[in-house]
Image (cartoon, helix red, strand yellow):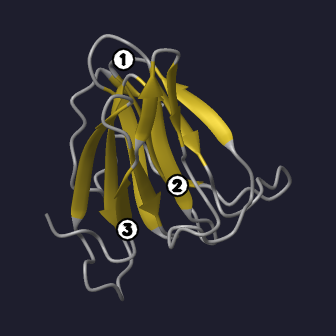
């Protein structure tokens, strides 16, 4: 699959033993590291799409830590070599990956299966409560050529 320009996907390694496992999500010596803004976790219930939105300054770095999520990206940057392209990734806690999404790439996600999906994000910017860098489209926006297989969006 051709990735949208600026998007990266890195397989993450689970280090397991009889006690459980440890998994690094982001390190400053990785090429994926841009800048530290904050770390947060979000959850998505089954049959609901959380999308669409994009950022003008922020790079997102998603990692699924519980369940399975379908992460969908749409390149809305008219000057990009991959303008109009869709990338779709099914990522799980059992097969962990870091999906990095640059500014102006619209994205959303939904849980796959019957359980919630938990995603940790390491964005490059700190959330600004007074002027959020979050720009939204409805999950069924005609401006984005993708149809979620869910009952509703949010």
Q: Quick one: 78 or 66, which is closer to the camera?
A: 66
Tell which circle, 2 or 3, labels the residue nearer the N-terminal end. Answer: 3
Mark 3 lies on residue: 7
- What residue is at 43 percent from the left and 28 percent from the top? 16
Q: Farthest residue in the right direction?
A: 130
- What residue is at 37 percent from the left and 66 percent from the top? 8
The image's mark for residue 95 is none
Q: Which of marks 1 and 3 is in front?
A: 3
Q: Nearer the viewer, mark 2 or mark 1?
A: 2
* Neighbours of disc 2 within 10 Å: few (<14), some (14-19), many (20+): many
Q: Is residue 25 above or below residue 37?
A: above
On screen, residue 44 versus residue 94, left or right, reads right
On screen, residue 8 versus residue 88, left or right, reads right
Q: How far apart are the two marked residues, 2 and 1, measured between alpha carbons? A: 22 Å
Mark 2 lies on residue: 61
- What residue is at 36 percent from the left and 17 percent from the top? 46
Q: Say how many tags the image has.
A: 3
* Neighbours of disc 3 within 10 Å: few (<14), some (14-19), many (20+): many
């Amino acid at each position: 699959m051709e990735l949208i320009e600026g998007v990266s996907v890195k397989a993450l390694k689970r280090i397991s033993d009889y006690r459980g496992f440890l998994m690094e999500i982001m390190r400053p010596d990785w090429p994926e590291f841009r800048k530290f803004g904050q770390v947060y976790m979000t959850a998505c219930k089954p049959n609901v799409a959380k999308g669409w939105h994009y950022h003008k300054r922020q790079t997102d770095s998603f990692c699924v830590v519980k369940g399975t999520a379908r992460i969908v990206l749409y390149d809305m940057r008219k000057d990009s070599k991959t303008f109009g392209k869709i990338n779709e990734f099914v990522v799980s806690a059992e097969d962990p990956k870091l999906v990095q999404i640059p500014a102006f790439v619209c994205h959303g996600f939904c849980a796959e299966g019957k359980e919630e999906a938990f995603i940790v994000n390491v964005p490059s910017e700190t959330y600004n409560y007074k002027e959020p860098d979050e720009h939204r489209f409805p999950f069924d926006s005609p401006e984005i050529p993708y149809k979620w297989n869910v009952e509703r969006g949010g």
